[in-house]
Image (spheres, helix red, strand yellow):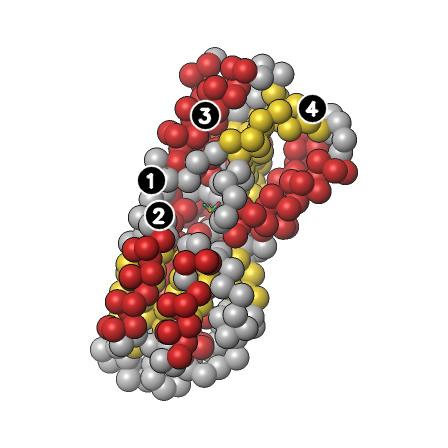
């Protein structure tokens, strides 16, 4: 570790240990988030210890205790179940370890919360739904309660239904696991078969959307369905833009940028600098039409065209390198 010239202590000496503790590691979003965190950590000469998430609350608690024992200066907690984290996170704070939370409500004024402006994200997606379909249709909705971003998006969906009485939610389903897309596909098949009038599915997580698309293709009803989602990856762009795809829009950030922002927030905290309690990375609406028109095929091409996909001004400082992608 050489340290970062011009940086405040302890980054001037380098080798600052930070733990990234995830609840979910599978899927494009979480892999890209981790890659962004790693790139930002490298640029800050941080010794990043990554604890893989396996959707296991007990294991995540154990990992936080392991990180404390490793003598880390900071911990980034990426998703998780708040009820199983409060006491171990408090132990970390009591030892002077800085904690940053991404998409998990730890409800502690000492813990900055990173999010993708989920209310805005869901609102943008649902505005596009109305543009394409009007406000009277039968819908399917993919949701699993207990995940902060999904709960925030759900608040917008609930209000949308209250404001648009012609929108009828025929079925609600979903699954978050290490096989989210395929398990959601199985559920979607049953739902779409039982409710042939469903013309719109709101699936605000790309693994959900992928599952619904799989089901629609298997059932041969892709031309009668429109899917609206959150998130984007290179694989998602391919699935959205391919001929006859029912996946017509998504609202997304670059998860790598969100990963980088999370590490920057931890670094600022460790350096004793001011970090806002709420750190937001704003999402962008990407329609099938706009992606096809732009000829964009990868997330890197997206980043080259849309500045928000290459960097964010959240949690920056003059001593922190932030041009990573
Ligand atoms: C199970 S929660 C999945 C969501 O977390 C992140 O906020 C991503 O946007 C994804 O949709």
Which dot marks residue 187? 3
Label 2 with label 1: CB-CB less than 8 Å:
yes
> How many other residues sit within 10 Å of disc 1, few (<14), some (14-19) or many (≥20)?
some
Image quarter (top left, top right, bottom left or bottom right) of the N terminus: bottom left
> How many other residues sit within 10 Å of disc 2, few (<14), some (14-19) or many (≥20)?
some
Determine whether 236 is above or below 94 in the image.
Answer: above
- Distance between the Cα atoms at labels 4 and 3? 21 Å
Label 3 with label 2: CB-CB less than 8 Å:
no
Q: What residue is shown with label 1?
A: 178
Q: What residue is shown with label 4?
A: 137
Q: Residue at x 36, y 86 (%)?
A: 9
- Distance between the Cα atoms at labels 4 and 1? 32 Å
Q: What residue is shown with label 2?
A: 55
Label 3 vs 2, first from the N-terminus: 2
274 or 21: nearer the viewer: 21
User: Regarding mark 1 in the picture, which secondary structure is present there?
Assistant: loop
Determine whether 286 is above or below 107 in the image.
Answer: above
Which dot marks residue 28? none
> How many other residues sit within 10 Å of disc 3, few (<14), some (14-19) or many (≥20)?
some
User: Regarding mark 4 in the picture, which secondary structure is present there?
Assistant: strand
Q: Residue at x 46, y 20 (%)?
A: 189
Label 3 vs 1, first from the N-terminus: 1
> How many other residues sit within 10 Å of disc 4, few (<14), some (14-19) or many (≥20)?
some
């Amino acid at each position: 570790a050489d340290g970062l010239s011009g940086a405040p202590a302890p980054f001037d000496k380098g080798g600052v240990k930070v733990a990234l503790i995830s609840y979910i590691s599978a899927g494009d979003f979480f892999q890209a988030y981790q890659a962004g965190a790693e790139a930002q950590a490298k640029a800050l000469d941080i010794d990043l210890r990554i604890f893989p998430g396996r959707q296991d609350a007990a294991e995540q608690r154990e990992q936080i205790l392991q990180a404390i024992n490793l003598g880390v200066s900071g911990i980034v907690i990426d998703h998780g179940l708040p009820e199983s984290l409060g006491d171990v996170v408090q132990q970390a704070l009591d030892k002077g370890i800085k904690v940053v939370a991404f998409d998990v409500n730890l409800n502690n004024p000492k813990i900055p919360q990173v999010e993708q402006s989920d209310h805005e994200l869901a609102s943008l997606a649902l505005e596009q739904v109305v543009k394409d379909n009007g406000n009277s249709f039968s819908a399917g909705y993919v949701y699993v309660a207990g995940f902060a971003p999904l709960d925030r998006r759900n608040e917008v969906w609930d209000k949308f239904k209250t404001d648009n009485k012609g929108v009828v939610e025929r079925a609600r389903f979903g699954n978050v696991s290490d096989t989210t897309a395929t398990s959601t596909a199985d559920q979607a098949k049953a739902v779409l078969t039982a409710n042939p009038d469903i013309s719109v599915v709101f699936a605000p997580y790309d693994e959900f959307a992928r599952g619904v698309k799989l089901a629609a293709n298997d059932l041969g009803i892709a031309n009668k369905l429109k899917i609206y989602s959150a998130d984007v990856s290179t694989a998602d762009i391919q699935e959205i833009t391919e001929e006859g795809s029912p996946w017509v829009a998504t609202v997304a950030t670059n998860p790598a940028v969100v990963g980088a922002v999370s590490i920057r927030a931890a670094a600022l905290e460790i350096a004793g600098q001011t970090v806002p309690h709420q750190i937001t990375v704003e999402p962008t609406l990407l329609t099938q039409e706009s992606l096809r028109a732009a000829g964009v095929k990868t997330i890197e091409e997206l980043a080259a065209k849309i500045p928000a996909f290459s960097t964010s001004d959240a949690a920056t400082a003059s001593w922190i390198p932030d041009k990573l992608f």
